[in-house]
Image: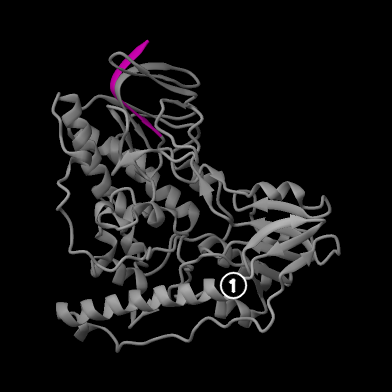
Amino acid sequence: MERASAVVVGAGHAGLAASHFLSQRSIDHVVLERGEVANSWRRERWDSLRLITPNWQSRLPRQRYEGQDPDGYMTAGEVAEFIERFAKLSNSPVRTGEDVTSVRRTDDGYHVTASHCEISCRSVVIASGACNQPAVPQFSHAVPASVGQLTAFDYREPGSLPDGGVLVVGASATGVQLAAELQRSGRPVTLSVGEHVRLPRSYRGRDVLWWMDASGVWDQRYDEIEDVARARRLPSPQLVGTAERATLDLNVLTGMGVELVGRFAAVRDGHALFSGGLRNALSLADLKMGRLLDTFDEWAATSGRGAGVDAAERYPPTRLPQSARLQLDLRSGEIRTIVWATGFVPVYSWLQVPVVDQKGRLLHDGGTVASPGLYALGLPVLRRRKSTFICGIEDDAGAVIGHLAGYLAGQSPSPAGLPATAGHDRPPELAR
């Protein structure tokens, strides 16, 4: 049996960042990847997908975007190439084709079993991602067989769907992007809308994510957020990366002809039933956006950065349909396909350590999992609001591996390696 000080599970940007900092500290380790480096970007993305963060924000330890289009947005293939370059630059000890099937606790650490190896180690970094499996409601089994169903993992392009109407379920970044693409293809689209985060693509002449970065909102720490569990469940913002830097919100979609309905609540006797709370969902998203823009304006005024941006602006409220349907007969032929854009969940079936709650969520404190020597990276709001994005992994990985190094050295560092008072002043929370 092999031995190592640390095993990293996953060779996406999070696992490779962990490897980078482990190498910096001369900690012997191995990175196990079920497929290829950046596997999910290569195998589990639709054809037209682009990052919602601008290229200049794409950064990893010792690696930055150096192309000719800093304000553009990478395709999935370009993201995979960006991550693969990082793996080569870091000389990371990646073993591809190693599907981890078991991690269990031992007297002196952990026993890791993968496709072609068994490793005894003192610590494990879980960097297998937050999007391992689409989150599809159980009532999907009640959808009539005449209606095709697929998830964002399955979808590639409109031509792969049959002609006829499409019900897209979910109004996060994935849902609005697919609804727009399918509507442009000539298919009638109905979009089921629940909780969502509305943002303009640009605000006061700058990309809205420039504001998130520059104002310090993205640097807000997890232990400064009043309800971090809720913040970690927030859907991705309604953004799309296009050369035109265009806003893609529900007003744009209804202007294209997309029909809005409420949250998909159930299927009964072949009918899709929708919540009557659409008005509240739209109003709440508008309210949160207004509060966030107020935060940006206040920062611009107090930081002295206001001179370099355009004047403050506000946007029309989301238009409520005159009579949003509360049900739809799925047997009528109006809807031929349902696309579930209802988010994703991580899968920890291979983790034989009691650190997962009843809903399948990993129990951790800023990346320090509730078992000595076990750590996590790449999860939403792991340590900061920007943890979800590629640009957030450097800070997270540096802190988590710092804690791991202290553990291996026999020290007892504070949770996740940083004092609770570190970080920016607290900005208003998006999760409120």
x and y, in percent, of residue 47 in the image: 58, 57
Residue 402 lies, with reference to residue 263, above or below; the image says: above
**Colouring:** one colour
Residue identified by numbered label 1: 278
Q: Residue at x 50, y 41 (%)?
A: 359
Q: Which residue is drawn at 19% across and 28% down?
A: 407
**Which quadrant does the N terminus fall into?**
top left
Residue 87 visible in image = no
Q: 414 and 266: which one is in front?
A: 266
Residue 154 lies, with reference to residue 11, above or below; the image says: below
Q: Which residue is drawn at 47% across and 59% down?
A: 235
x and y, in percent, of residue 87 in the image: 34, 40
**Which quadrant does the C terminus fall into?**
bottom left
**Residue 3 lies in the magenta stretch:** yes
Q: 229 and 413: which one is in front?
A: 229
User: In the current view of this chain or complex, which residue is farthest to the right?
Assistant: 332
Residue 69 lies, with reference to residue 113, above or below; the image says: below
x and y, in percent, of residue 373 in the image: 28, 27
Q: 4 and 383: which one is in front?
A: 383
Residue 121 lies, with reference to residue 62, above or below; the image says: above
Instruction: Give the residue type that dot 1 points to.
Output: Leu
Residue 38 visible in image = yes
Most common secondary structure along the magenta stretch: strand
In the rendered structure, the answer to whether residue 44 lies left or right of residue 112 reads right
Q: Residue at x 81, y 67 (%)?
A: 334
| SS label for mark 1 | helix
Q: What stretch is highlighted in magenta?
A: 1-9
Q: Quadrant of residue 3?
A: top left
Q: 85 and 348: which one is in front?
A: 348
